[in-house]
Amino acid sequence: MIGIHPDNQVPELKDYNLYTSDPVLRRAVARGGAQWRDAELVRQGAEYGAEATLRAAEDANRYTPELQALSPTGERIDQVKFHPAWHSLMAMARRNGIANLPFFDARPSAWSAYGASLYMHSQIESGSTCPTTMTKACIPLMRLNAPLYKTTADLLASLEHDPRDIPLAHKHSMTVGMGMTEKQGGSDVRSNTTLAVPAGQGPWGEEFRLTGHKWFFSAPMCDGHLVLAKTQERGDTCFFVPRWRPDGSKNPIHIQRLKDKVGNRSNSSSEVEFKDAFGVLIGEEGRGIATIIEMATFTRLDCALASAGYIRQALTQTLHYTRNRHAFGKALIDQPVMTELLADMALESEAATLLAMDLATHFGSSDALDTAWRRVMTPVAKFWNCKRAVGLTGEAMEVFGGNGYVETGPMGRLFREAPVNSIWEGSGNVMCLDVLRAISRNPDDAHLVLDHLQDVATQAPALLAQVQKLRTALQLPPAALERQARRFTQKLALTTQACLMLQHASDEASSAFIASRFDPDWGPVTGITSGSQDPAALLSAAWA
């Protein structure tokens, strides 16, 4: 990966292994007990770094989805056409377990194995992770409807991608998306107006007819969607709305247009109208928000994992570039100010990976601390990793200079991709309020989390002080604490990352992280300080 080009142009980073070159990820997989998956992850790492995969990712984003609402004879078909590269990436994600692994492998460590695969896939092509991870997240909800799940279990468990737009009875696998937000409400889903009217009992359970719209319906070519709609009797309720009814007829879900998005261009997001569309009940009538929030918890984990992947890819690309680009008589990576910046980015990447991968391990157990950790730390990790990914990908683009600000290089798409996870499944303010909501509903959860952090922080007085500040903040009146929701969530994220670094990183890296992140000058600009007297040592340890 290192070599001097006669024109000082950096060769493309390709044909490398994302897994074997990432020591932080490999250690996280081992700590999560997923050594049984190691050989498969090595295979996946090579597949993701292969030139053919990189070209497919480019093509899937260059040749974007096209809506074909009507057939040549004027019939509504509501189909979205994709480039073949999209389907190759969807097939890759599916066979790598991203659509289902932790729900069809009973080992708790399956969550760590799953997290590693999603983390790597997101670095190369993120659009295809959207319908794939939504499919995974829907599985526990689909199980709430016994007759529906009996019909779909094998399709959900399949490792084969089946792109055919045909009824479920004839498919080898299926994908499931979500339809929650409406144009008048956005995150305020209680203001939804889509109406569901009872229509009797059918082969898939209690049937309803839905009329209304969805402002963001992703991805419309999924075989079905979990949708929020109101019933006249009970209010907000969750439904499974398929593309094809059980009798094989097309469900009247009319795609109005595809969103012209800043990033995530390979994936189709749409606006739809339900015209007396068929749906079946999922969960308890009137508890639709509580039901679908369970799915959102799993997808918020995915946002944290994927954003850690973005940060890792930004670091990997900048390390490759600065090792091979020379200025003022030496490699960029050896210029002192650049070394400091890259070391700071390396710390950021390691801490983001630890935060996300550690969170994944807590999804594999139901003891008191694991449950508390999931409730409190899922929105924390989603908020923090997604926010940091936006800044770090921009910083990485700047390292490339003009070479980063062109579409022929890797940074443009990575930079455009980063903001989506901050917005999807709840924006920053929503995540911070959800942290406070989780704590207010289950105060013991906050004590369990903070007690655990305090036990770790006994090794570092600076960290003990941070834990105490968090405890003090929880004593504020609710209105005052809500005003400080972002400050509290940031402090909890950084304290948790510091504790994880103290537990799992090298002495050099953990000391540097604690020294830098709690330095008053750290924060607004990356690279102000890495907290280390030997930043080059941090870089040599970052990429195997």
Image (cartoon, rainbow, N blue to C red):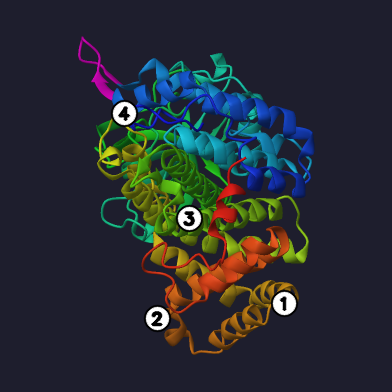
- In the image: residue 332, left or right of residue 408: right
**Residue at the disc numbered 1:** 451
Q: Nearer the viewer, residue 299 or 13?
A: 13
Mark earlier in primary sequence (1, 3): 3
Q: In this view, does 383 lie above or below 323?
A: below
Q: What element carries label 4?
A: loop
Q: How far separated are the C-alphas under marks 1 and 3? A: 29 Å
Mark earlier in primary sequence (4, 3): 4
Which residue is pictured at 64% across the width and 65% down the height?
A: 510
**Nearer the viewer's eye, disc 4 or disc 3?**
4
Looking at the rendered structure, the number of numbered marks drawn on it comes to 4
**Residue at the disc numbered 2:** 483
On the image, the x and y values in percent for residue 168 come to 53, 21
Q: Which of 291 and 491 is in front in this view?
A: 491
Q: Residue 97 lies in what quarter of the image? A: top right
Mark earlier in primary sequence (2, 3): 3
Badge 4 density bin: few <14, some 14–19, many ≥20, Cα 10 Å: few
On the image, the x and y values in percent for residue 243 come to 43, 27
Give the amino acid at mark 2: Arg
Give the amino acid at mark 3: Met
On the image, the x and y values in percent for residue 514 come to 59, 71
**Residue at the disc numbered 4:** 7
Give the amino acid at mark 1: Asp
Q: Nearer the viewer, residue 20 or 209?
A: 20
Q: Is mark 2 on a helix, strand or loop?
A: helix
Residue pushed farthest front? 329
Give the amino acid at mark 4: Asp
Q: In this view, does 179 lie above or below 44?
A: below
